[in-house]
């Protein structure tokens, strides 16, 4: 916490135990905001206050954990730990792919190669008012341009999987005007990842398989009714990983 002004004297530092308590309280509020939002979407989706619909997206959990014994989802060939992924467009399913299948199917109308860039956006502009206009109920989501939906959609995690929301395009266009970097957001292959639960807020452009991995991370890290103490650490670790990949 910042120093507190004393009367007639220099600023006085908050004792270390008080600072720890304040930081713990802040973390608890952020966790409560996340948990409260996610728990509402463990049940069936319904309409938003403005009449737009929340829809349960396919339960895509991102690429499976990398390890021995993985096989290509298209031909069954064994895969190395570091392998490629394809997005199946209709089901928004992330498929693991061997090199021959990736080369043959990348041009199919059914599939799209996932993106390759990760860009950390420290100067991204998204005011509270602009964020509210999206009517997204939690501060953890990703946006993607979808060729099948023919619009920009937002997907946010829940204990049951991904919940999808079509956006008011006027709000999206205004966001792009404020942040021209979004003009180059590749359709289907990459997304804008948003974490407004952190302080400061965090924004990045990431390959679409990494975007969906956030959904899988929340689902796999969720414990009990409240989500458990590991959930916040897992989300923080995910965004730390994005920042490191962007800097590499």
Image (spheres, rainbow, N blue to C red):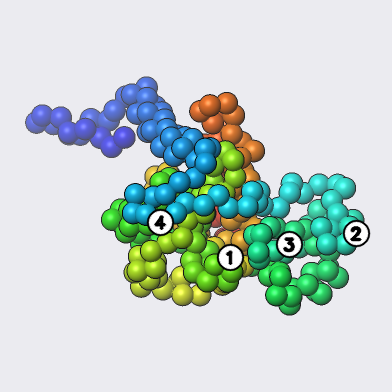
Residue at the spot x=35%, y=69% of the render? 170
In the image, 225: left or right of 116? left
**Viewport quadrant of the C terminus:** bottom right
Q: Looking at the image, do the residues carrying marks 2 and 1 touch, with CB atoms under 8 Å apart?
A: no
- Image quadrant in which you'd find residue 206: bottom right
Which residue is identified by label 3? 85
Q: Which residue is mark 1?
A: 190
The answer to which of marks 1 and 4 sits earlier in the sequence is 4
Q: Secondary structure at mark 4?
A: loop
**Foreground residue, 15 or 187?**
187
- Estimate the spatial distance between the alpha carbons at disc 2 and disc 1, rounded to whole Å: 26 Å
* First-in-chain label (4 vs 2): 4
Question: Which residue is painted at 57% across and 38% down in the image?
Answer: 159
Quick check: marks 3 and 4 in contact, CB under 8 Å? Answer: no
Number of numbered discs: 4
Question: Foreground: 20 or 163?
Answer: 163
Query: In front: mark 4 or mark 2?
Result: 4
**Could you tell me how far apart the alpha carbons at marks 3 and 4 are, in whole angstroms?**
32 Å
Circle 1 SS class: strand
Q: Residues within 10 Å of mark 2 (few under 14, many from 20)?
A: some
Q: Which residue is under mark 4?
A: 52
Q: Position of residue 243 (x, y in %)?
A: 54, 55
What residue appears at the point 86 percent right and 54 percent down from the top-left corner? Answer: 71
Q: Hey, which quadrant is residue 51 in on the image? A: bottom left
What residue sits right under mark 2 in the picture?
Answer: 77
Residue 122: x and y in percent read 43, 59
């Amino acid at each position: 916490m910042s120093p507190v002004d004393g009367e007639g004297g220099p600023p006085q530092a908050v004792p270390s135990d008080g600072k720890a308590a304040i930081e713990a309280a802040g973390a608890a509020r952020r966790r409560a905001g996340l948990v409260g939002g996610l728990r509402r979407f463990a049940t069936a989706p319904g309409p938003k206050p403005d009449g737009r619909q929340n829809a349960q997206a396919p339960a895509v959990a991102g690429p499976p954990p990398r390890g021995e014994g993985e096989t290509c989802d298209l031909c069954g060939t064994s895969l190395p730990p570091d392998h490629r992924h394809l997005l199946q467009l209709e089901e928004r399913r992330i498929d693991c792919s061997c090199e021959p299948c990736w080369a043959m199917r990348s041009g199919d109308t059914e599939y799209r190669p996932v993106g390759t860039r990760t860009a950390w956006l420290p100067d991204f502009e998204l005011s509270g008012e602009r964020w509210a206009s999206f009517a997204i109920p939690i501060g953890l989501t990703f946006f993607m341009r979808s060729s099948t939906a023919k619009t920009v959609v937002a997907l946010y995690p829940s204990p049951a999987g991904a919940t999808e929301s079509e956006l008011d395009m006027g709000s999206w266009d205004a966001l792009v005007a404020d942040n021209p970097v979004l003009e180059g957001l590749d359709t289907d292959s990459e997304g804008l990842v948003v974490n407004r639960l952190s302080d400061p807020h965090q924004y990045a452009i990431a390959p679409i398989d990494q975007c969906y991995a956030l959904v899988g991370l929340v689902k796999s890290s969720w414990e009990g009714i409240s989500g458990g103490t590991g959930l916040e650490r897992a989300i923080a670790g995910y965004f730390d990983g994005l920042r490191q990949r962007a800097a590499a």
